[in-house]
Image: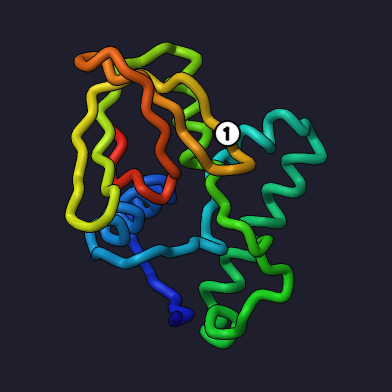
């Protein structure tokens, strides 16, 4: 197991996150965990919080600018580290949106031992506690369950 810091550039944080996930999924690693760097939904949080949220957003931007100016701050580990569990809010939000819209998607699933599945499906359920995804295969008319770490791509 290795601890690494990876700088991924993109026009937005979401694009950079997508590039990182794509690279990690294509790499063939047994497993990975993203502990920090996910900054999605900040604008929504600021708008919901009102004037207090605007002040918090300004503080967040100021701290980012300070971190960019100070290389030592970037290299030092963060004291307020993310929880040990994998932060999947970006992925779970996309999955919940697909469930709500009953959207037809295509999953690329890597079951291991060279078994790869390409499934046109609709998502039935997401169990966040066990990280299980239940889908309905529209061609075979069958229900399948997969762990989130088995999913390579989500189109």
x, y percent for residue 101:
44, 12
- Residue ID at (29%, 48%): 111
x, y percent for residue 68:
52, 73
The answer to whether residue 144 is left or right of residue 47 is left
Camera sees residue 42: no
Q: How many marks?
A: 1
- Residue ID at (68%, 47%): 57
Against 18, residue 68 (above or below) is below
Against 129, residue 22 (above or below) is below
- Residue ID at (54%, 84%): 75
x, y percent for residue 83:
68, 61
Against 3, residue 143 (above or below) is above
**Image quarter (top left, top right, bottom left or bottom right) of the C terminus:** top left
**Image quarter (top left, top right, bottom left or bottom right) of the N terminus:** bottom left
The answer to whether residue 73 is left or right of residue 124 is right
Q: Which element carries disc 1, helix, strand or loop?
A: strand
- Residue ID at (59%, 43%): 130
Q: How is the image coloured?
A: rainbow
x, y percent for residue 13:
43, 50
Q: Residues within 10 Å of mark 1 (few under 14, many from 20)?
A: few
**The quarter of the displayed image where residue 82 is located:** bottom right
Camera sees residue 129: yes
**The quarter of the displayed image where residue 23 is located:** bottom left
Against 18, residue 36 (above or below) is below
The answer to whether residue 131 is left or right of residue 1 is right
Q: Which residue is mark 1?
A: 127
Q: Residue furthest bottom?
A: 72
Which residue is nearer to you in this view: 29 or 35? 29
């Amino acid at each position: 197991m290795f601890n690494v810091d990876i700088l991924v550039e993109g026009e937005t944080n979401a694009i950079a996150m997508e590039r990182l996930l794509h690279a990690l999924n294509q790499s063939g690693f047994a497993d990975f965990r993203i502990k920090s760097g996910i900054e999605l939904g900040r604008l929504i949080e600021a708008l919901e919080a009102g004037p207090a949220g605007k002040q918090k957003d300004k503080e967040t931007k100021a701290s980012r600018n300070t971190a960019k100016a100070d290389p030592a701050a970037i290299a030092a580990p963060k004291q307020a580290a993310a929880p040990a569990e994998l932060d999947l809010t970006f992925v779970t939000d996309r999955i919940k949106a697909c469930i709500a819209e009953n959207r037809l998607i295509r999953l690329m699933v890597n079951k291991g031992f060279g078994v790869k599945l390409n499934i046109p499906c609709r998502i039935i359920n997401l169990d966040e506690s066990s990280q299980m995804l239940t889908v309905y295969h529209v061609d075979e008319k069958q229900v399948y369950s997969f762990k989130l770490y088995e999913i390579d791509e989500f189109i």
